[in-house]
Image (tube, helix red, strand yellow):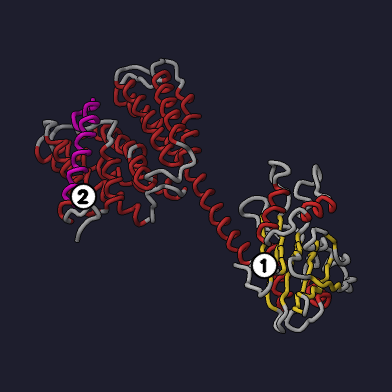
Amino acid sequence: MRALSGAPAWAVYGAKIAIIAGAYYGSAKVGLDLAFATSSVTAIWPPAGIALAALVLWGPSVWPGVALGALLANAWTGVPLVTVLGITCGNTLEGVVGAHLLRAADLRPSLERVRDVLALVLLAAVGSTVIAATIGVLSLVVGDEVSIDRFGSVWRVWWLGDMGGDLLVAPVLMAAVAYWPFRRLPGRPIEALVLAGAVVGLSLYVFGQTTNLAYLVFPLLVWGALRFWQPGAAAASLAVVTIAVAYTANDHGPFVRSNPDDSLLLAQTFFGVAGVTVLLLAAVITERRRAEETVEQIAEALQESLLPSRLPDVPGIDLAARFRPVGAAHQVGGDFYDVFESGDGGWVVVVGDVCGKGPHAAAVTGLARYTLRAAAVYAQRPSRALAVLNDALRREPSARELCTAVYARLDRDADGFRLTFSAGGHPLPLLLRRDGTVEQIGAHGIVLGAQPDPRLADTTVEIHPADSLLLYTDGLTDAYAPARTLAAADLESLLASCAGMSAGEIAERVLRAVLDLTRSEPRDDIALVVLRIAD
């Protein structure tokens, strides 16, 4: 089997082992340089986080890399061989058990869920670190490096040191791999550079003071979580604790105590808690964002299902439609249009507007669209089809469903097409003749669903080659109401200027003219259909 790089599988595996062992050994040297109580126990232990991240990301088969790194790190500390082997076993088991528990808990390395962060804290940082601390200190006791009466104090330093590694180092590595190349993050590269500079600069100032000003870095940690999610939160926390530890180890800063181990533990614990806090904040943000994306996808699919996927090819007629939803991305609008064959050779064009928005309006929109399609099978007159929809709306349990609609039927005749239509409380169509004259046709009816017997009338007109018809919802004229409305005369004048254009050009020009009235967002959905009789 070949890896993606083309190298043999054994070479890839060997490279992973070498990387883990090298990273473990290098970070262990840094941690052991800060060992005070005994040469093998330190309050700062980054290798724990490196081991955990490697075993989570690459699987349990890479455990020899952890074991090799731990063996090399402890071999030169001067303790007996039995102690070195015991510590190596404890460090390896800690990582293997921690990674196993996290996999069993279905942890995502991206830490994008609150449960992932809690699993990391409870199962790995608090739980599995007990293994290394217990086996390691027992090994020191067996090797006469630590007296039994000091078991508790040494165990505490070991446990908290490993816990800090799991809480501060492992999240950085896991989030970096999970989010690479960071295109999903809302923050931009220049902002990341500014944040990094602010974190380093403020940390250098804060931890160079004897006065405790550590709380000043919290806004920057929150900034990292808000704009760069888990990678930003984890990286900012690690940068801050690195600077804090460097100052504390040199007896500077607000965390200095009489005992060096206590000083380092105080610094690491403080920012370990802070790191977990901002990781939880980042998890809440990403969970919310993921939920919003899911809702948006559902709303988009639902909105698309309420409109025809494409306009049909109607012989002799050029068709175009435009739909502009308004509002939050998860908000489904109530405007709709449809074009379909009636079953007896005629064609039906419907434009409607359901009262309200959201799932309830979507349900009524679906009811309206498919009721009219069903009514077209047996209702020859448009007014009769709208009456069927009126009855369907009134039969709904809530009795609050209201809808306006215009139903137009096209039948071919000797001179072109005969248009028969009816309107139920809807803006009347505009007919553009080939000579540029525009007329509003038909008569307003009662809003559908409001009364048991609405006054609906049929109007028939002849339309000839190069004539165009515009059907639209009131979002077109009231897009910016009440500050600015498009009067009927303005719309007619706009349509008159479209004489000679194709249906698509008319639809686009009308929509663009309305949207260009102001740069603000329209207040209502816009739906329009243009049909033009071929020359």
Q: Position of residue 163 (x, y in %)?
A: 33, 38
- Residue kind at label 2, given as amino acid type: Trp
Residue at the disc numbered 2: 63
Q: Residue at x 35, y 17 (%)?
A: 252
- Residue kind at label 1, given as amino acid type: Asp
Q: Main secondary structure of the magenta part?
A: helix
Q: Is residue 116 visible?
A: yes
Q: Residue furthest top?
A: 210
User: Quick check: 135 above or below 379?
Assistant: above
Q: Secondary structure at mark 2?
A: helix
Q: Which of pointers 2 and 1 lies earlier in the amino acid sequence?
A: 2
**Residue 382 numbered mark, or none:** none
User: Quick check: 447 above or below 223?
Assistant: below
| Magenta span contains residue 26 | yes
User: Quick check: 228 above or below 449?
Assistant: above
Question: Pointers 2 and 1 in contact (CB under 8 A)?
Answer: no
The quarter of the image holding the C terminus is bottom right
Left or right of residue 109, residue 480 in this image: right
| Magenta span contains residue 414 | no
Q: Position of residue 440 (x, y in %)?
A: 85, 61
Q: Residue at x 76, y 65 (%)?
A: 467
Q: 225 or 190, which lies in front?
A: 190
**Residues rendered magenta in the picture:** 13-40
Residue at the disc numbered 1: 318
Q: Which class describes the residues within 10 Å of circle 1: few (<14), some (14-19), or many (20+)? A: some
Q: Residue furthest left?
A: 81
Q: 346 or 498, which lies in front?
A: 498
Measured Cα–Cα span from mark 2 to mark 1: 69 Å
Q: How many marks?
A: 2
Left or right of residue 82, residue 239 in this image: right
